[in-house]
Amino acid sequence: MIRVLLVDDHDLFRQGLAQLLQLEPDIAVVGEAGNGLEAQRLVKELKPDVVLMDVHMPLVDGVAATREILRENPHVGIIILTMFGENAHVFQAIRAGARGYLLKNSRAGEVIAAIRAVKAGASQLDPNLTTEVLQEFRRLAEKAGVDDGISSLTKTELQLLRLVAAGYSNKQIAEKMCFAESTVKNRLSVLFQKIEVQDRTQAAIYALTHGLVPEQVLMNHTGAESRTGV
């Protein structure tokens, strides 16, 4: 059962979303919060698997709440679900560690698929935002310098990065590279620290901005129910 916490300052929206999600046999809404501060408290208390988080809320906004929640609970999957599709909000949420970013005009099936994908360790980005995200991260990579640390990666680390960006799970990577699954997990932790990313979505974007995989990979990686598992 996927335990979900809803965080939004509009009561009617939360109630409607809760009723929708409770129709799914594998999803349970375990709590609701009206602001980011309350969300931080409820994550500690209720231990959800996935948090659906709005951006603009009183007391503490969604991006700040995401950052604080993941600092103490790094395994929680946070999906930003908001009316705002501006680039600044998307980039801030991804940098804060959100694994998903969907607009509130998304279809119900897209939200449900995102919850299941994030619970499985994957990522979900609204397809309408993917191109803009890639353009911005490429711009930032160029500003930081062409190398940006990539020359320090070993051949094994480069292969790991390509497979992560392509959406392979740890189990699939282990089979492909003849490693134990625990070894893959450890090597990915080291790799993520080395390239200064927090999760698989950021790793995929890093790979794309450095020309390691084709752009269509991120479209598949973030726009559909992914195969990845952390």
Image: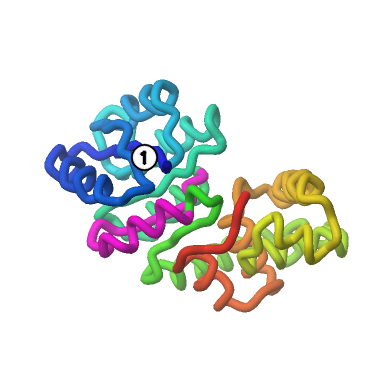
Circle 1 residues within 10 Å: few <14, some 14–19, many ≥20: many
> Which residue is nearer to you in this view: 28 or 126?
28
Taking the image as shown, residue 61 lies to the left or right of residue 207, namely left
* Number of numbered labels in the structure image: 1
Q: Where residue 189 sits: x, y (%)?
A: 73, 44
> Which residue is nearer to you in this view: 189 or 49?
49
| Residue 158 within the segment the image draws in magenta | no
Q: Residue at x 12, y 42 (%)?
A: 12
| Quarter that holds the N terminus | top left
Q: Residue at x 74, y 47 (%)?
A: 185
Taking the image as shown, residue 215 lies to the left or right of residue 187, namely left
**Residue 143 in view, yes or no:** no
Q: Residue at x 58, y 73 (%)?
A: 217
Q: Where residue 60 sits: x, y (%)?
A: 33, 31
| Residue 107 within the segment the image draws in magenta | yes
Q: Where residue 86 sits: x, y (%)?
A: 33, 59
Q: Amino acid at mark 1?
A: Val
Q: Secondary structure at mark 1?
A: strand
What residue did someone put label 1 on? 4
> Which residue is nearer to you in this view: 129 or 99?
99
The residue segment tinted magenta is 97-117
> Which residue is nearer to you in this view: 147 or 23?
23
Q: Where residue 62 sits: x, y (%)?
A: 35, 39
